[in-house]
Amino acid sequence: MLTSRIAIIGGGLSGLYAAHLLEQQGIKDYVLLEARGTFGGRVESAPFGGTQLADTVSVPNGVSRKADRFDLGPTWFWPAFQPELDRVIRDLGLTRFQQHEAGDMVIERSSMASPERMRGHLTSPPSMRLAGGMGALVDALRSALPPDRLHSGQRVRHLHVDGQHIGLETEDIDGRRTSYRVDHVLLAVPPRLAMAAIVFSPALPDALAQAWSATATWMAPHAKYVAVYDTPFWREQGLSGQGRSARGPLAEIHDASSPGGRAALFGFLGVPAHARTTIPDDQLLAHCRAQLTRMFGVNAGSPRAEFIKDWANDPYTATAADREGATLHEAAPLSSAGAGAWRGRIVGIASEWSPQFPGYLAGAIEAAGRGVQTLLKATPQERQTP
């Protein structure tokens, strides 16, 4: 059995940032466990040359370039509203740029109506993106952490109270199991996913378990499509790249181009998750290309590359409840048990536990910060020096 003072379950943005904060406090005795084969969680930036992460990738004669990464998960942040996230990005030396919105937008008002141009609108305060995609934030955090404390491909199956400690069991892709004994757990996976994937012994308090199970997981029911081009030809037509459609399959479209990189359009699929499973990938790609051609012209029908990421098909994001039920994002649930065997032992730090920005990138930063502070206040004597 392996031992560690703290286990961080989940290697997305909140888990990596929690590890970063522990390192800053001189706390070295922790382990980070991620079920996926890669780190980042719902932050996924696919390179133009193809990626194993996207569900569907089509790249005819593509050549990768460093600047050509396209977000299949979260895309934007708002420094004016989210100063803590902005501070982290600046401290890590990452380059940000404003989302392109200048020009007219295109709308399809009904399934029978022809596309129309209308005056576009600018987000205020402006939304910002990162050079290299939001994956650059994950890369920067991960690269500063000791590799021997980060373990991917380790799915946590069971947590149980064992006297003064917590027993933790993981399973890898080949079914091999590893046991840990820890003092505290920072839970950096969405609350609903944690309840569906992990057995808690004894069970969490009923009210807490019900609240976690009822908390919708952000991104879980959604799918994104990205089409990559050599140039942003729509801008030459006075278009912003923004679109709205009641016809679909894309309900909302935006410019996904990056300065110094290739041009791109991306859209959120408006087709429900259960209906997407009945459409073959090649047909769905063809429908998306046809829509972009209707709305932005013939050049849009021949992208250099295409990506589809269906988060509803990701077992490390979506549960059956996320795929089948309505997605209602309400106030963040309690992040820890107030009584019983789990009191003071486990704290939820995924974005859904953020009071201000549940589900957003800024929420992951906020929730992780609050969780680490809660742990440090409860156990100040456990701090270490580098």
Image (tube, rainbow, N blue to C red):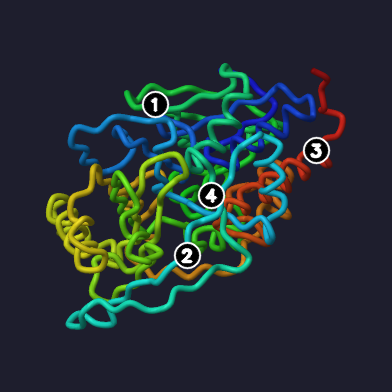
Could you give the CA–CA distance between mark 1 and mark 4, rounded to whole angstroms?
Answer: 34 Å
Label 3 residue SS: helix
Question: Would you say the residues marked 2 and 4 are in contact, meaning their CB atoms lie under 8 Å apart?
Answer: no
What's under tag 4, amino acid-wise?
Arg
Between 99 and 163, the one nearer to me in the picture: 99
Q: Which residue is mark 4?
A: 129
Quarter placement of the N terminus:
top right
Q: Residue at x 48, y 38 (%)?
A: 132
Label 1 residue SS: loop
Q: Which residue is mark 2?
A: 102
Between 333 and 352, the one nearer to me in the picture: 352
Q: Which residue is mark 1?
A: 172
Q: In the rendered image, which quarter is residue 300 located in?
A: bottom left
Circle 3 Cα neighbour tier, 10 Å, few/some/many (<14 / 14–19 / ≥20): some
Label 2 residue SS: loop
What's under tag 3, amino acid-wise?
Leu
Between 365 and 190, the one nearer to me in the picture: 365
